[in-house]
C-alpha cells in the first residue's frame, strides 16, 4: 500500500477510535442512569474501558511482536470489539452489559498500540508529523461528542447504542485497511532484549513521567465538570470548556512539526509538565474567574497534545524492531491505564475530605514531580548522539 493511502487509513482509524471516546466518556454514565442502574453498578460499568487499558494493551502488544502478525491481530480486535458492543443493542441488564463491554474493551484496547507503532514506523519516528496525523483522532472526539449531544437532546439517551455501533463499524472497516508496519534492518533497539530496554534509566524516567502526567489528569477527567458546575457554570458552558480544550489540543498537534524543529523533545516535555502544574492550579483556585478558567483549558494543548506527541517519539526511539507494539502498549498501560485510573480513584476518595481546590492542587504537585523526574532522568543530548 502506498504511504499516502496507508496514512489516510490510519487517519480514519484515529477518527473512529477517538470518536468512540467522544461518545463513551460524556454519555455512557448518562445512558446507564437513564436505565435506572444503581450508582455502584454505574461505577463498575463506566470503569471497564479504563481498567482494560491497564493490562490488555500489554498482552496484545507482546502477542503482536512475538508473532509478527500485527495486521491480523488488528483485524481481529476491530471485529471482536464491534461484536462485543452489539450487546448494547440486545440487552439493558447489568450482567450482559458487563460481559459485553468487558469483552469489547479488551479487544478495543488492543488496536491502538498496534496502529501507533505502525504510524511511527511509517513516519520514521517524526513526532511532529505524527501529531499532524493524530489530529484526526481529536476531530473525531469533537464531532462525535457534539453530534451525539444533539441527538440525545432530540431523541433521548437510547440513541447511544446505535451511535456506538456506527462508530465501531467504521473502526472495524479501517482495521482491515491499516497496513502491516515494516521492520527496519537498522532499528537501534532491534537486537536489545525487552528487559534490557526497561532497565535504561531514561526509559524508566519516561514511563514515570507519563504515569504522573496521566495521574495529574485523573481528577480533571473525573471531576472537572462537577467542580465547575458547583461554582455556577451552566451545562452548556461546561460543554464549551471541554471543546475549547480539545480545540487547543488540535492546534498544538498542528504546530508540533514547527515546535520539534525549534525545541528539543526534552524541552517540550518539560514545558508540558510545567504548564500542567499551572493549569491545575488555575482550575483549583480560579474556577470562579472566567478568564483564568479559559486559560486553563487552552493549556490542554500542551498538557495532552505536546506531551503525547513527544512521548510517542521517545517510545518509538527506545522500543524499535520487534519491540514496537510492546513499547506502545506499555506507554498506554502506564499512562491512560495505571496513571489515569489511580488519579481518578484517589481523587474520588479525597474529594469529600479535601474538596476540589486541594485535589486539583495535588494534581499540580504530581505534574511538578513529573517535571522533576524528566529534568533529572531524560538525557539532554539528542538521541542520535547517545552511545
Image: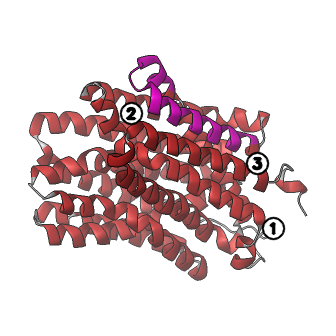
The residue at the far front in this view is 353
In the image: residue 85, left or right of residue 113: left
Distance from the alpha carbon under mark 3 to that under mark 1: 30 Å
Which of the marked residues, 3 or 2, is nearer the chain's N terminus? 2
Residue topped by disc 3? 375
Q: Are marks 3 and 1 in contact (CB under 8 Å)?
A: no
Q: Is residue 312 above or below residue 92?
A: above
Mark in front: 3 vs 1: 3
Which of the marked residues, 1 or 2, is nearer the chain's N terminus? 1
Residue topped by disc 2? 242
Residue at the (32%, 61%) spot, across then down: 47
As helix, strand or loop, the secondary structure at mark 2 comes to: helix
Residue at the (30%, 38%) spot, across then down: 226
Asked if one can make out residue 260 in the rendered structure from this viewpoint, the answer is: yes
Residue topped by disc 1? 186
Residue 332 in percent (x, y) is at: 53, 61
149 or 41, which is in the foreground? Answer: 41
Residue 162 in percent (x, y) is at: 19, 52
Q: Quadrant of the N terminus?
A: bottom right
Residue 294 located within the stretch drawn in magenta: yes
In the image: residue 367, left or right of residue 54: right
Magenta segment: 267-295
In the image: residue 369, left or right of residue 375: left
Amino acid at each position: 500500500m502506498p504511504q499516502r493511502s496507508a496514512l489516510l487509513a490510519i487517519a480514519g482509524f484515529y477518527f473512529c477510535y477517538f470518536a468512540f471516546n467522544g461518545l463513551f466518556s460524556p454519555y455512557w454514565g448518562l445512558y446507564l442512569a437513564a436505565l435506572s442502574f444503581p450508582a455502584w453498578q454505574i461505577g463498575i460499568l463506566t470503569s471497564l474501558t479504563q481498567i482494560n487499558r491497564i493490562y490488555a494493551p500489554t498482552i496484545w502488544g507482546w502477542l503482536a511482536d512475538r508473532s509478527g502478525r500485527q495486521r491480523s491481530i488488528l483485524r481481529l480486535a476491530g471485529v471482536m470489539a464491534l461484536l462485543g458492543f452489539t450487546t448494547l443493542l440486545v440487552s439493558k441488564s447489568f450482567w450482559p452489559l458487563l460481559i459485553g463491554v468487558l469483552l469489547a474493551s479488551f479487544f478495543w484496547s488492543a488496536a491502538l498500540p498496534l496502529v501507533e507503532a505502525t504510524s511511527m514506523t511509517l513516519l520514521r519516528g517524526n513526532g511532529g508529523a505524527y501529531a499532524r496525523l493524530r489530529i484526526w483522532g481529536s476531530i473525531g472526539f469533537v464531532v462525535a461528542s457534539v453530534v451525539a449531544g444533539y441527538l440525545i437532546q432530540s431523541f433521548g439517551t437510547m440513541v447511544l447504542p446505535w451511535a456506538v455501533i456506527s462508530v465501531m463499524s467504521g473502526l472495524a472497516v479501517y482495521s482491515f485497511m491499516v497496513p502491516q508496519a515494516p521492520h527496519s534492518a537498522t532499528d537501534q533497539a532491534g537486537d536489545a532484549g525487552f528487559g534490557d530496554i526497561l532497565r535504561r534509566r531514561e526509559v524508566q524516567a519516561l514511563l514515570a513521567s507519563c504515569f504522573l502526567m496521566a495521574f495529574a489528569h485523573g481528577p480533571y477527567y473525573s471531576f472537572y465538570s462537577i467542580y465547575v458546575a458547583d461554582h455556577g457554570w451552566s451545562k452548556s458552558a461546561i460543554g464549551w470548556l471541554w471543546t475549547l480544550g480539545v480545540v487547543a489540543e488540535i492546534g498544538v498537534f498542528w504546530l508540533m512539526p514547527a515546535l520539534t524543529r525549534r525545541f528539543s523533545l526534552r524541552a517540550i516535555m518539560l514545558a508540558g509538565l510545567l504548564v500542567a502544574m499551572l493549569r491545575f492550579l488555575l482550575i483549583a483556585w480560579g474556577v470562579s474567574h472566567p478568564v483564568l478558567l479559559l486559560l486553563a483549558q487552552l493549556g490542554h494543548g500542551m498538557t495532552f497534545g505536546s506531551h503525547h506527541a513527544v512521548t510517542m517519539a521517545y517510545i518509538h526511539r527506545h522500543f524499535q524492531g520487534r519491540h514496537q507494539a510492546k513499547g506502545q502498549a506499555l506507554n498506554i498501560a502506564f499512562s491512560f491505564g495505571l496513571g489515569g485510573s489511580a488519579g481518578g480513584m484517589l481523587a474520588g476518595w479525597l474529594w469529600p475530605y479535601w474538596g476540589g481546590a486541594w485535589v486539583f492542587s495535588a494534581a499540580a504537585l504530581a505534574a511538578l514531580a513529573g517535571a522533576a523526574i524528566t529534568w533529572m532522568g531524560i538525557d539532554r543530548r539528542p538521541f542520535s548522539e547517545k552511545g
